[in-house]
Image (cartoon, grey):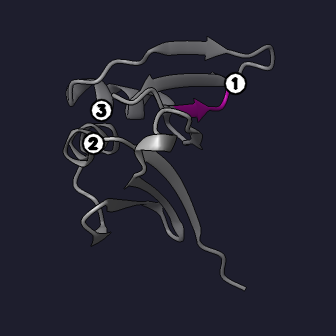
Amino acid sequence: MTVDLFAGVSVSDFATALAWYEKLLGGPPAFRPNDIEAVWELAEHRFLYIEVRPAHAGHGRQTIFVDDLDSVVAGIAERGLEPANRETYDNGVRKITYVDPDGNEIGYGGAPL
């Protein structure tokens, strides 16, 4: 059985969010199903999308666990975004959190060094 995951983030302004997520995710969306949604494919069968839903904007929290956290964070910095928070848990797992213009938190996690 194949399972596709679509993790959604509610935003208030499409153009502002689109530009921010393009910087965060490294490029334009894989597709735009309509005028208020944009979808990025993070990995096979794994998608992150934004949708204009102003009443719900700013309440999202997503974490994307990656193999090479330092490389991902460096690439995001090159595109002009800096993290809002950096954490290292007791077990050594690291999490870098970015906050979009609405206040949604998108975290990147990585294995201990």
Task: Give me the residue at 59% from left, 24% from top.
Answer: 95
Which residue position holds label 2? 13
89 in relation to 111, above or below: above
Which residue is nearer to you in this view: 38 or 52?
52
Q: CA distance from mark 1 to mark 2?
A: 33 Å
* Left or right: residue 64 compared with residue 29: right
State which quarter of the image contains the C terminus. top right
Tell me: residue 61, above or below residue 78.
below
Whole-angstrom CA distance, mark 2 to mark 3, is 25 Å
Q: Which residues are magenta?
A: 107-112
Q: How many marks?
A: 3
Q: Which residue is mark 1?
A: 93
Element type where label 1 sits in the image: loop
Which residue appears farthest toward the right when viewing the image? 91
Mark whose residue sits in front, 2 or 3: 2
Please, what is the three-letter code of the amino acid marked with disc 2? Asp
Image-quadrant location for residue 84: top left
Relative image position of residue 46 (x, y in whole percent): 53, 63
In the figure, is residue 25 to the left or right of 96? Answer: left
